[in-house]
Image: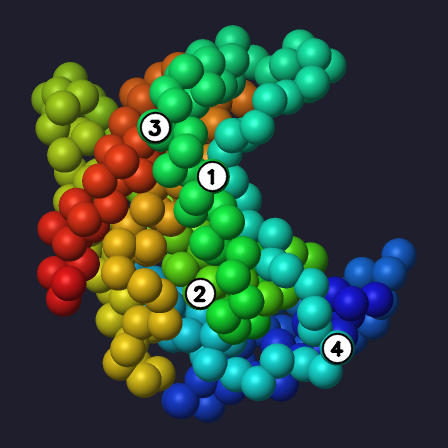
């Protein structure tokens, strides 16, 4: 019933503009909260079908900052369960259930000792009890109201953690969405298509950070942690996408950008110009 209590608490939160952060809880089913229906699409769908929904993305960043800045509900002691790449050995049964593309990524992750060490360090740093966190703030967990403002759903992974984990999940999902939505044609080369997706991602990330910083203007994470956390989140998105596709261009891009940021998180400053 912890998720029910957290979802009820989240539904009581309001941004500085008076907007709800999460839908109201209208019931409980199988121990999980049943939230008020939101007729609009999810944020990932809007991103794939819109040119650049900066207003929505900025509002998503504001919603996350509101959660992180709020007084947590009584009795919240658990850690947020952020997604992370499979840095530890997997069982034979798990390995046999992976796709060929996932096995390729797993081999690369486990074969790079420096990358694995950095990834485990980021995983541990995101577990630090800094503030209440959603735990799974991907674009698929934001629903868009008729008012064109997104609200968070699915509080199953919520708990204490570093706010960088939530923002990294949002930023990682944004690139995955934009890579999929940036179509190629005979007139557009794959390199040009990729460049366009990354350029749109940079704009989207800046919008999310602008919305986040509306709360108090200061980032609640240490220097370079967000860049490294985004790198880890991109590796997660590469591994997840590889479950149902080949090692295609989006998977390769997610992996390469993710590994690059994890190795050199200071590169994040080229995206977050404030840094």
Q: Earlier in the sequence, mark 1 or mark 2?
A: 1
Image quadrant in which you'd find residue 204: bottom left
Q: Quadrant of the C terminus?
A: bottom left
User: Callout 1 environment at 10 Å: few (<14), some (14 to 19), or many (20+)?
Assistant: some
65 relative position to 187: left or right: right
Alpha-carbon distance for marks 4 and 3?
38 Å
Q: For residue 75, which numbered disc appears in the image?
A: 4
Q: Secondary structure at mark 2?
A: helix
Contact? badges 3 and 1 (CB < 8 Å): no
Q: Secondary structure at mark 1?
A: helix
Alpha-carbon distance for marks 2 and 3?
25 Å
81 is higher (above) or lower (below) than 35: above
Residue on which disc 3 sits:
114
Q: For residue 163, which numbered disc appears in the image?
A: 2
Q: Closer to the observer: label 1 or label 4? A: 1
Contact? badges 1 and 4 (CB < 8 Å): no
* Front in this rendered view, residue 105 or 17: 105
Q: Closer to the observer: label 4 or label 3? A: 3
User: Callout 3 environment at 10 Å: few (<14), some (14 to 19), or many (20+)?
Assistant: few
Q: Earlier in the sequence, mark 3 or mark 1?
A: 3
């Amino acid at each position: 019933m912890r998720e029910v209590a957290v979802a009820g608490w989240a539904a009581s939160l309001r941004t500085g503009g008076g907007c709800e952060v999460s839908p109201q809880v209208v019931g409980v089913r199988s121990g999980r909260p049943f939230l008020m229906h939101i007729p609009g699409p999810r944020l990932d769908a809007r991103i794939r079908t819109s040119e650049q929904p900066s207003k929505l993305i900025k509002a998503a960043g504001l919603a996350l900052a509101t959660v992180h800045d709020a007084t947590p509900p009584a009795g919240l002691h658990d850690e947020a369960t952020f997604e992370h790449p499979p840095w530890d050995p997997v069982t034979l049964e798990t390995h046999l259930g992976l796709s060929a593309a996932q096995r390729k990524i797993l081999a690369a992750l486990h074969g790079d000792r420096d990358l694995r060490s950095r990834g485990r360090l980021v995983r541990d740093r995101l577990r630090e009890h800094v503030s209440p966190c959603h735990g799974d703030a991907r674009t698929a967990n934001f629903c868009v109201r008729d008012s064109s403002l997104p609200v968070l759903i699915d509080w199953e992974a919520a708990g204490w953690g570093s706010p960088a984990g939530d923002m990294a999940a949002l930023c990682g999902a944004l690139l995955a969405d934009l890579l999929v939505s940036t179509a190629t044609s005979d007139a557009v080369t794959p390199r040009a298509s990729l460049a366009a997706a990354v350029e749109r991602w940079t704009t989207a990330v800046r919008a999310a950070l602008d919305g986040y910083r509306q709360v108090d203007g200061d980032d609640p994470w240490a220097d370079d942690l967000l860049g490294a956390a985004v790198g880890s989140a991109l590796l997660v998105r590469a591994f997840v996408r590889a479950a149902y596709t080949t090692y295609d261009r989006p998977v390769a891009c997610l992996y390469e950008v993710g590994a690059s940021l994890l190795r050199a998180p200071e590169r994040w400053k080229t995206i977050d110009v404030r840094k």
